[in-house]
Amino acid sequence: MYKEYQKEAQKIISKMTLKEKIGQLNQITITPYMNDIKNLHSMIRNGEVGSIILASSATAGNDPQGHVNVDLYNELQKIAVEESRMGIPMIYGRDVIHGHRTVYPLPLASASAFNDSLIEKCYRNIAEEATADGIRWTFSPMLDICHDPRWGRIVEGPGEDPYVGAQMAKACVKGFQGDDLTDKTSLVACAKHYLGYGFSEGGKDYFRTEISDATLQNYVLPAFRAAVDCGVGTVMSSFNDINGIPVSGSKKYLNDILRGQLGFEGFVVSDWGAVEQQEAMGFAEDRKDCAKNSIKAGLDLDMCDKCYIENLEALVNEGQVSEETINLAVERMLCVKLAMGLFQRPYGEKHDYDKEMHLADARELAAESMVLLKNDGVLPLKKDANIALFGPFVSERRSLLGTWSLDGSEKDTPTICEAMSAAKSGGKLIVHNTNGLFDNSEYLSTDADVIVLALGESHWTTGEHHSVSDISLYASQIDLINRMRSTGKKVVGVFFCGRPMALEGVVENLDAVLYAWHSGSETANAACDILFGDVVPSGKTPVTFPRKATHIPLYYNITASSHPVNGYYGDHPQDNYTDSIATPLYPFGFGLSYTKFEYSNLVVDKQEITLEDLKQGAKFDVSISVTNIGDYDGKETVQLYIRDKVASLMRPMRELKGYKKELIKQNQTTNVNFQLSYNDLGFYNENGEYLVEKGEFEIYVGENCLTENKLSIKVV
Ligand code: NOJ
């Protein structure tokens, strides 16, 4: 896809000086030059800038970033195109992560929707909006699989499952890039953070990781494989080291695996400072050494730390780096620029888009992302009920947008209080923001039929450089729940969070729990859609919810153990720890509805297939009947897991291999079919070779990873 532009790129390169080539590998941020714009102009004119990042700080996710300005970008681009000797356009990138003007649910929340086509549609909308502001490249999707919710960035990724990660990767890349990369609404995607960043020890951001090659292949790489397979244009190298080797200086990860095994053809950009940090990590002597490591490893574009522009020329002149290595990196940069049609249409083109439709899609995805964790019959609420709405999130706007919403408008984001008063048809709404010193909620609740508590965590406790040591709910919120419980009224908890929190001892004191996440511009409206029954909840957890914070790491796709200490699947949970039961509070794939689904008749069309036939394309057809036996039409995400009973590499007790989200009407039965093929039944060994081994596989199909609907097949 990008390599087809190789010849054209080489032709351009043959006319470039070494300095101009190195300029192509240099990305800068505009901000420091805003008071020195002449200097910026001359750098561009001299061919020293290949790309500009539209962010003013390295940790842009929670810092204010200033406004986008397409006129300024075009003015600078004009200098690159018309006044630099080679006339090569620059590529502008911005962190358009889960929305641009319209903000969609954070990726972890979107993953809960298990609705790939809706996610793709929303990411297409995002691309339309961002390109209207002159942005043609985004640093998204973030594909870091994570087992530790203390990590602030868990919210930016798909959660704990590689299959969900791969599905998200495909939906986001397709949505951003569209069908035609040269279209003015196409946004080049960037799969990040390659590699293993989500495995940082203790959930501490930027920290070390220890990842075996087999774990890397089977847990960490699948989402990147999927992104590469659907043509992602760029990949960002991560800050972390893996087993003592910084990824941004590693030929093994950037070249051998990414390009050799995965077949990636685009360019690799470093994370901001990931080149120069090798000095601090004790992997390079100085900045020059950092540049040498990274360029030799296969890192093409240096984000903002100037190591390349300052050192590559000397490294080539001294014979430490060959000009061929530089040419290759430039070629990859140019191939992407050519594939985008940037040479023909270098300027940002303002265009209209259907803002109302984008908001409607955001509301739909937000509602599908929210997970109903508990309901003792109190939900849905009547629109004319007397409702007491209390809690620290009653008037919150900013956190609902979530981290990394650079261009979303806080003032246009409704609060839960505003959304609820708009949705109600009568009755009282008694509102009290319980952040104050004096809290008379008990007294105020006297007139209420039901109490709704708006709870959760600030966006400030999530995102880059914002990990927490404890994922328990705050004591003040627990206290509020307990006090409301003692009124004897029904109490509903709505949680606006960016990670799974440890809620044992909390949910017991609530009659219903809606996990609303930080779901973007339409969070509050979508939560009300569910609370009042206009939408029947259908989200499912893409991460395990542990009972206690101390049970981390707890994830569903673990291997079996020699002793019954596993706990996840209910096998002797009391043997895990002497002081607590460490089964999940809510397992992976869990989520309730207002209606009820009954599963029956799990069948497979054949008991066995030979390995040879499987390789030739034979498949197992698995199907199950799902009946809606409740009182509402509703959507159910039917999930299929496998367990490879015996293999040369221990396999997880469950591995998700398929899901289908179906709308099933009341009293209706739907047959849900899955196919299992060669690509579903294997695993990668530590060398990255894909293997399917003969033997028995258990197949589980149901409502979450603990389903007991099971059959068995054989590869012979
Ligand atoms: C650092 C973050 O790790 C990365 O995700 C982001 O894209 C860059 N900064 C650019 O803002």
Image (tube, grey):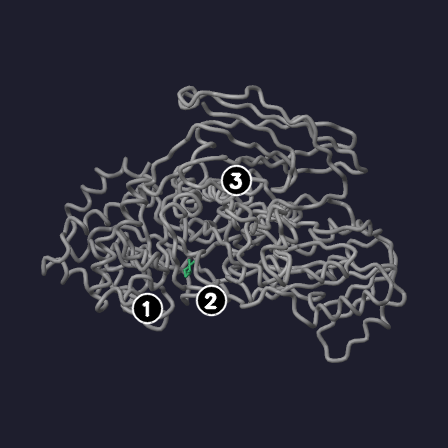
Looking at the rendered image, the disc whose residue lies closer to the viewer, 2 or 3, is 3
Q: Secondary structure at mark 1?
A: helix
Quadrant location of the C terminus in the rendered image: top left
Residue 250 coordinates in the image, percent (x, y): 28, 54
Front residue (pair 136, 525): 525
- Left or right, 230 with respect to 486, comes to left
Name the amino acid, label 3.
Glu
Q: Tell me how far mark 2 sits from mark 3, CA to CA.
A: 31 Å
427 to 217, vertically: above or below:
below
Front residue (pair 45, 259): 259
The mark nearer the N terminus, 2 or 3, is: 2
Would you name the residue on which mark 3 appears?
655
Would you name the residue on which mark 1 appears?
37
Would you name the residue on which mark 2 appears?
465
Q: Residue furthest front?
A: 563
Looking at the rendered image, the disc whose residue lies closer to the viewer, 1 or 3, is 3
Q: Quadrant of ligand 1?
A: bottom left
Q: Secondary structure at mark 2?
A: loop
Residue 16 coordinates in the image, percent (x, y): 16, 50
373 to 579, vertically: above or below:
above
Could you tell me which residue is drawn at 21 percent across and 68 percent down? 285
Q: Residue furthest left?
A: 318
Res. 483 visible in picture: yes
Name the amino acid, label 2.
His
